[in-house]
Amino acid sequence: MEFKHSFNVFVDNFSTTYKLLLYKLIVIAITVGLSCAVVIPTINNFLNTTQYEQLSTAFSELWSDLIALNTENLREKMVALRQALSSFRHLLSDKSWLVAVAAACLAVVYLINRFLVGIGNYVTGALLNDRMVMHANSPFTFTLFKNWKKALLYSSIYAPLAFAYDFICLVIIWAIISVGLGFVPIALVKIFLIAVFFILFSAIKFMFTVDWLPALIHGKMNNRKAIVYTFSRSGKRTSSVLSHALVFKTLLIALNVAALFFTFGAGLLLTLPASALLELSYCFVHYFDNNRLKYFVDEYTIVGPQKEAPVSIKEFFTGDGED
């Protein structure tokens, strides 16, 4: 039923998708701007070198001969291109410190992106909670300013943890594919395995963080208690959550990839924020169901236990226990 209720809550809160889209566009603009500030000066540092000019010239000449089907000097052009590539590789080695600094700066930009996304997730979670508890249509901006301190605190903890987890997972995937399965000659097999490991690690992270935001927002816990609560999987149907997470991640990745190829990327403007909203809907539905709480799935439907306490003998004969 969690799948069904999560989808119902998602549909009931679908207007939040457009609010989240606007926020994500702002985050993307900030991320792209910071990335360009790092990448462009680094690239220019290599473009203004003799080695790059020689490489560009050798490649252009070889490409022109290939297009014109001129094979007379093809061997010499290939030799010149290999020499230019070798010189450019030496340049990269000499300026490896610059590449390392740029990579470190991009890692910081990625961390900033995760931090801003975390704030948006907190605000979206607060909107979902208001809708599920009171069926209120809270404004995104008002909710952001109302909860900015809590959102900043949550994101300042979540973003570094998520960043560290993602980095460790990337290292593990690289080690498995490049070292452990380096003998596999078929590239498609490696791509398949990368996708499998990516979905698996994403589902594991989702499983251990599924209750964090609901515990903060609805449970009124502080971050320490919320972290302990979400990582404690005792009595929370862990296998079921992991199974749901695997299905969610697979379907959402398929949906976003389809939007990328069949709409030339335009559909991602809708599917990316909708994916985030659907995942958050599941988090809150799971928390409410696990704690036997009532909530709205739409304007006319409330789901949850009919009564939190058993009916006493007095209530049974007097009728006080009836809803």
Image (spheres, helix red, strand yellow):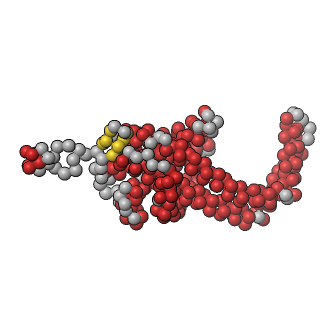
Horizontally, is 109 left or right of 159 in the view?
right
Question: Residue at position x 87%, y 58% from top?
Answer: 50
Please determine whether, in this image, residue 83 is positioned above or below residue 105. above
Tell me if 179 is positioned left or right of 296 in this view: right
The x and y percentages for residue 193 are 54, 45
Q: Is residue 251 visible?
A: yes
> What residue is at 55 percent from the left and 59 percent from the top?
115
Q: Position of residue 41 (x, y in %)?
A: 76, 59
**In the image shown, does 70 or 309 lie closer to the viewer?**
309
**Which picture quadrant has residue 235?**
bottom left
Point out the image quarter for the C terminus. top left
The residue furthest right is 72
* Quadrant (top left/top right/bottom left/bottom right) for the N terminus: top left
> How many numbered marks have been drawn onto this rendered protein structure?
0
Position in image of residue 285 (x %, y %): 37, 47
Between 259 and 118, the one nearer to me in the picture: 118
**In this picture, is 160 found above or below 263?**
below
Tell me where residue 189 sits by quadrant: top right
Query: Can residue 197 be seen in this snapshot?
Result: no
Height in image: 252 above or below 153?
above
Tell me what residue is drawn at x 60 percent, y 48 percent. 25
Q: Residue at horizontal 9%, vertical 45%?
A: 318
Which residue is nearer to you in this view: 143 or 210? 143
Task: Tell me residue 66's x, y (percent).
Answer: 85, 37
